[in-house]
């Protein structure tokens, strides 16, 4: 272990000495990844460089030219950079699973699976500095408050400039912030416009229905956990049951029975949700729910829980189809 730390320290020191005067400034001179859409590079070519960004951690980050090798430390941002036409070259996982698992299973990323090779940086909970260093990123992106980040923030900055985003910001704001990092502001506005149009189309269909919808995760197949805040429900015109509360509230089966929603949607890993339902099938309370009797228990992919542009667009499609 001591040998690994010593080697890593030497590599970081060498990299820092070879870099520009400021450890937070890097000239991105690598070639455009083959997976990037060449038709979407106009915005980055026209953007003013160098540029200085003030990130969500209130750091001033200077980028000399459009970063072409992006490393992200949480899979939440995979969809943002894929949508912007600049897939990251490396990604850590999420609280559960790795980046590779996300690429292989996320429904939101299905259209992009064959468009990029993404280096898997392992767990987002234990950031692997050696793996990040070996990926040779031009910029490192994650969110402010990322667990364990404070202890290695300075070392990450020796590898490449670090930009922190606000995980709590709207998907529109986060799309724009990701676009500023790579100079794709015009592309971001196009993505936002197209996604908002899809959401509006779903709203027109859903809001006309007098049906209640309860969205849940399962806490690893153990309990009902509310999913989707009030703003999310309003975006799509969804009607929540009277006793449903937002923001990750936990509910017993009896509480769900009191809601008695017309539609019960698990937005989680499908196998986990289905396994959870299996444990309920012997319950008289479960079997007497209106949604169970009417076969309106549905399973949406866990990737919708990023609430990013691709997730919102896919959710819009699903809700519109559900209520047509």
Image: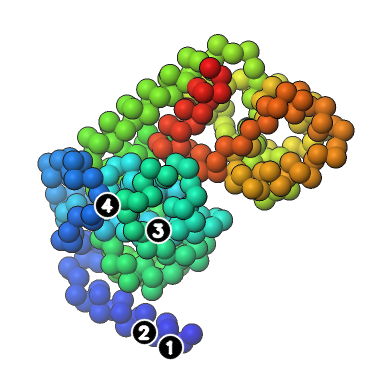
Residue 227 position, x and y percent, is: 61, 36
The label shown at residue 7 is 2
The label shown at residue 35 is 4
Q: At 25% across and 66% down in the image, what residue appears?
A: 23
21 horizontally vs 239: left or right: left
Farthest residue to the right: give it: 284
Q: Which SS class for mark 2?
A: helix
Q: Nearer the viewer, mark 3 or mark 4?
A: 4
Which numbered disc flags the more N-terminal residue, 4 or 1? 1
Q: Which SS class for mark 1?
A: helix
Q: Read off the residue under disc 3.
A: 91
Q: Nearer the viewer, mark 4 or mark 2?
A: 4
Q: Nearer the viewer, mark 4 or mark 1?
A: 4
Quarter of the view holding residue 278:
top right
Residue 148 appears in view: no
Quarter of the view holding residue 244:
top right
The label shown at residue 3 is 1
Q: At 13% across and 45% down in the image, what residue appears?
A: 45
Q: At 21% across and 65% down in the image, what residue appears?
A: 22
How is the structure coloured here?
A: rainbow
Q: Are marks 2 and 1 in contact (CB under 8 Å)?
A: yes
Q: Which SS class for mark 4?
A: loop
Residue 154 position, x and y percent, is: 36, 67
Spatial CA distance of label 3 from label 4 is 15 Å
Q: Nearer the viewer, residue 297 or 49?
A: 297
Q: Are marks 3 and 1 in contact (CB under 8 Å)?
A: no
Is residue 301 shown above or below 254?
below
Which numbered disc flags the more N-terminal residue, 2 or 3? 2
Q: Which SS class for mark 3?
A: strand
Is residue 199 shown above or below 301?
above
Which numbered disc flags the more N-terminal residue, 3 or 1? 1
Q: Are marks 3 and 4 in contact (CB under 8 Å)?
A: no
């Amino acid at each position: 272990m001591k040998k690994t730390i010593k080697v890593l320290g030497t590599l970081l020191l060498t990299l820092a000495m070879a870099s520009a005067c400021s450890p937070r400034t890097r000239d991105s001179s690598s070639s455009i990844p083959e997976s990037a859409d060449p038709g979407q590079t106009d915005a980055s070519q026209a953007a003013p460089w160098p540029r200085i960004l003030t990130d969500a951690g209130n750091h001033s980050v200077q980028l000399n030219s459009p970063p072409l090798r992006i490393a992200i430390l949480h899979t939440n941002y995979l969809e943002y950079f894929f949508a912007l036409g600049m897939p990251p070259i490396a990604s850590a996982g999420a609280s559960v699973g790795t980046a590779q698992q996300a690429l292989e299973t996320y429904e939101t990323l299905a259209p992009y699976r064959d468009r990029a090779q993404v280096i898997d940086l392992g767990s987002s909970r234990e950031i692997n500095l050696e793996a990040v260093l070996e990926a040779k990123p031009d910029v490192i992106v994650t969110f402010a408050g990322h667990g364990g980040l404070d202890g290695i923030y300075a070392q990450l900055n020796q590898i490449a400039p670090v930009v922190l985003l606000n995980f709590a910001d709207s998907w529109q704001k986060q799309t724009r912030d990701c676009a500023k990092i790579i100079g794709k502001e015009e592309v971001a506005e196009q993505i936002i416009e197209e996604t908002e149009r899809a959401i509006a189309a779903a709203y027109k269909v859903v809001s006309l229905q007098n049906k209640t919808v309860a969205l849940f995760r399962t806490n690893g197949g153990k309990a009902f956990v509310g999913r989707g805040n009030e703003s999310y429900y309003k975006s799509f015109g969804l009607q929540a049951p009277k006793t449903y509360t937002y923001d990750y509230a936990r509910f017993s089966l009896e509480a769900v029975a009191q809601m008695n929603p017309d539609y019960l949607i698990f937005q989680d890993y499908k196998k986990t949700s289905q396994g959870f339902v299996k444990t309920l099938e012997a319950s008289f309370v479960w079997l007497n729910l209106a949604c169970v009797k009417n076969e309106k228990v549905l399973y949406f992919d866990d990737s919708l829980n990023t609430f990013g542009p691709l997730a919102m667009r896919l959710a819009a499609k699903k809700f519109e189809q559900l209520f047509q």
